[in-house]
Image (cartoon, rainbow, N blue to C red):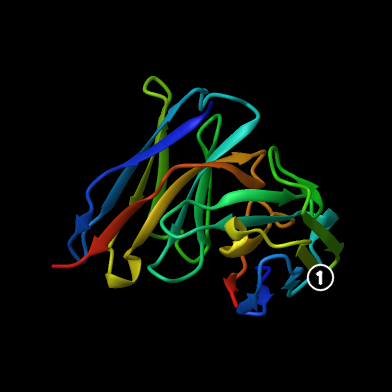
Amino acid sequence: QLQLQESGPGLVKPSETLSLTCTVSGGSISSTSHFWGWIRQPPGKGLEWIGNIFNSGSTYYNPSLKSRVTISDDRSKNQFSLKLSSVTAADTAVYYCARVWFGSYFDYWGQGTLVTVSS
Amino acid sequence: EIVLTQSPGILSLSPGERATLSCRASQSVYDRYLAWYQQKPGQAPRLLIYGASTRATGIPDRFSGSGSGTDFTLTISRLEPEDFAVYFCQQYGSAPALTFGGGTKVEIK
């Protein structure tokens, strides 16, 4: 059974960089059938797609976040990561990692991790 | 960017009733590339439907999806107590750009 687990600091200061890692078990991120993605959800609000990474390291980002986002992977550890720079309070959210079926819909999700931006 | 608008924002119903949730797109969604998710408090979303009408693995047949173009519907034929949750639609017709709707909360009346 595929499982995803987010990890990283729960508190980030304004203007700093948010960094999260998603560890995948029960499957390989090197699969050519799947993308791997990040989604976030501010408290009490809806879902926002952040970006995806695919097999060869190709990345696709939400245009509204593109200037601040970097998604990378480490296939030796079966992990992929998110970096979001210059954060503000508006970036406070639960961050989810997920498997993306052929870059389309999200079929497996991590449990999510709350990141709060505050000094 | 395709904007998805879900209505109503809140749907108050009793167990056993039929729920009809709407997702309207700002432009036509290519090839019915639309998914639905269920989210319960404190949990990650769960995929219910993809391709507008195909149920994901393990999803009960009381959940059904329909629609095409700009108008899509998620129907829960008879609400069970565990179905009270928030539901989101998501389009992937403009992949790699993906967007979600704002959600509909189905609450107990």
Q: Residues within 10 Å of mark 1 (few under 14, many from 20)?
A: some
Instruction: Locate residue B100, reporting x and y percent.
Output: 60, 63
Numbered disc total: 1
Instruction: Locate residue A13, reporting x and y percent.
Output: 17, 62
Q: Residue at position x 25%, y 62% from top?
A: A116
Height in image: B79 above or below A97?
A: below
Instruction: Specify the farthest residue to the left.
Output: A119
Between A85 and B34, the residue placed more toward the observer is: B34
Between A98 and B47, the residue placed more toward the observer is: B47
Left/right placement of residue B100 relative to residue A29 reads right
Instruction: Locate residue A14, reporting x and y percent.
Output: 20, 66
Quadrant in the picture for residue B99: bottom right
Q: Report the residue marked by disc 1.
A: B70
Quadrant of the rendering where the N terminus of chain A is positioned: top right
Quadrant of the rendering where the C terminus of chain A is positioned: bottom left
Between A78 and A2, the residue placed more toward the observer is: A2
Secondary structure under badge 1?
loop
Instruction: Locate residue B54, reporting x and y percent.
Output: 80, 47
Height in image: B44 above or below A48?
A: above
Q: Residue at position x 54%, y 57% from top?
A: B39
Height in image: B74 above or below B27?
A: above
Between B55 and B97, the residue placed more toward the observer is: B55
In the rendered structure, the residue with mark 1 lies on which chain? B
Q: Residue at position x 50%, y 58% from top?
A: B40
Height in image: A17 above or below A80?
A: below
Q: Residue at position x 52%, y 59% from top?
A: A62
Quadrant in the picture for residue B18: bottom right
- Label 1 amino acid? Thr
